[in-house]
Amino acid sequence: MTDGASGGERKNARLADLRAATMLRETAYLSFDVATENALLAIATEMNMSRLDVIRMALSDWLESRNESRMAANE
């Protein structure tokens, strides 16, 4: 794989992450399947958080994890 291809793949992955983050920005309006909604509500209750806060926390952790993975791959 050449540096150009690698850079292009990183750029595509970053764009995909940004697109996902933008779509999930207003998570209060997202609806999930029944099983996912039930799981979110159960976790939110257990953590004494709102459903929205649980989704935001999960998204933030996912994006941080993706960023750390990319940084490690570049070392």
Image (cartoon, helix red, strand yellow):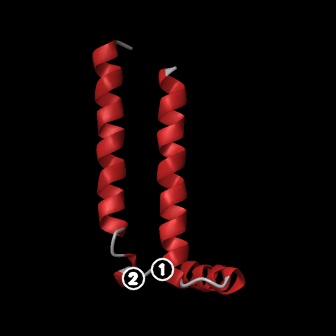
**Whole-percent x and y of residue 54?**
55, 74
Q: Is residue 72 visible?
A: yes
Looking at the image, which residue is at 31% across and 24% down? 7
Q: Quadrant of the N terminus?
A: top left
Disc 1 secondary structure class: helix
Q: Pointer 1: what residue? A: 52
Q: Nearer the viewer, residue 13 or 74?
A: 74
Which residue is situated farthest in the front direction here? 48
- The type of residue carrying mark 1 is Leu
Pointer 2 with pointer 1, Cβ within 8 A: yes
Q: Is 4 left, or right, of 73 in this rendering? A: left
**Whole-percent x and y of residue 50?**
54, 85
Q: Is residue 18 above or below residue 70?
A: below
- The type of residue carrying mark 2 is Ala
**Whole-percent x and y of residue 11?**
30, 34
Q: Name the disc covering residue 12, or none.
A: none
Q: Is 54 left, or right, of 45 in this rendering? A: left
Q: Pointer 2: what residue? A: 28
